[in-house]
Amino acid sequence: MEQIYNFSAGPAVLPKTVLQQARDEMLDWHGSGMSVMEMSHRGNEFISIIENLENDLRELLDIPQNYKVLFLQGGASSQFAMVPMNLLQNKTQADYINTGEWSKKAINEAKQFCTVNIAASSEQMHFTYAPTQDQWHLDPAAAYVHYTSNETIGGVEFNWVPKMLDTHIPLVADMSSNLLSRPLDVSLFGLIYAGAQKNLGPAGLTLVIIREDLLASPLANTPTLFNYQAHAKNNSMLNTPPTYAIYITGLVIAWLKKIGGLETIEQINISKANLLYDLFDTSDFYHCPVTKSDRSRMNVPFTLKDPSLDNAFLEQAKDNGLIQLKGHRSVGGMRASIYNAMPIEGVANLVAFMKDFAHKNA
Ligand SMILES: *Cc1c(COP(=O)(O)O)cnc(C)c1O
């Protein structure tokens, strides 16, 4: 099999050793005679899988005891509704930071449930930066403050955690595309959510980390499956959880622990991102639109000097085993997603190809 490097934004690359282990355990998990796909979610075997995942995740992220970890379905998009449905409680407004396509979707969904105050926005600058906190105009009556810690499409990342001046107002973050890419102080957040298919595992699993005091009554008529408290009370077994995605995510978390945890992966991620950003800074053939301090370590968008070369770039990249580099349809250009599981050789090969392509087409 030819070596391929897959730069897809999601579903995205998984660690090869994880896929090999899943292959080896496919038909018979740990002598059970069953595939994980065939197991009852309430049986001892699967309970041990989900408990190990939770324990490893708590250890890796140092999740405080007063936080619940929920393993849900519906994707990060379902959280765009679940967050207001559950966290508004007696309030009628919420603060949102608007930094790109994903925050816009979260905002539009929240508008169905409350008055949204756009506390800061980078829209007037085509979503090319993360507004610093002195530009945020928070509303003291807001039920919570929501931001997208990494804009997967625009490649804008908050390389800092906002400080809540009013500690009674919870900070909520969509971390779908950068959770577990670096150490994180979970205690600064009321709620963190992430779809698994970017940096954690396969599609189908949605992770929610929520401070226990926020597990209060949701809006009237909230469906049970949209109720955090109901999921928490039932240990994410209110209905059938996405068992196979949970199993694979467990293998990914174990892999992260084994290679040295979040400090180690952060250093690797910085090295990988620098390979690409250094190229942009030394070449006028490629351009990255994002403000330097807010460049994402996970999703690296860039354009070629001459967009008529885009198709040739993508085709020749593919011939070199470098795939899924086309930018999102809403922004065009290119995007290299270099999540935890992308090996540094993949990025080095991409950079070598890009230098060669620039040289030949200068
Ligand atoms: C991919 C993504 C989503 C949507 O995830 P789904 O699981 O497809 O609903 C939301 N937010 C961010 C930041 C994303 O990258």
Image: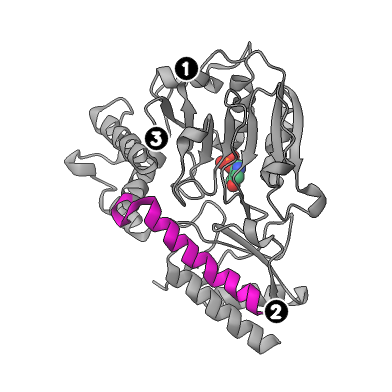
Is 292 a magenta residue?
Answer: no
The answer to whether residue 341 is visible is: no
Residue marked by disc 2: 285
Q: Is residue 276 magenta?
A: yes
Q: Residues within 10 Å of mark 2 (few under 14, many from 20)?
A: some
113 and 160: which one is in front? 160
Quadrant of the image containing the C terminus:
bottom right
Q: CA distance from mark 3 to mark 2?
A: 44 Å
Q: Nearer the viewer, residue 131 or 219?
A: 131
Q: Secondary structure at mark 2?
A: loop
Relative to 308, say whether 117 is above or below: above
Of the two numbered discs 1 and 2 in the rendering, the one whose residue sits closer to the viewer: 2
Q: Is residue 222 above or below residue 47?
A: above
- Alpha-carbon span between mark 3 and mark 1: 21 Å
Q: Amino acid at mark 3?
A: Ile
Report how far apart the C-alphas of labels 1 and 2 lie in the structure.
53 Å
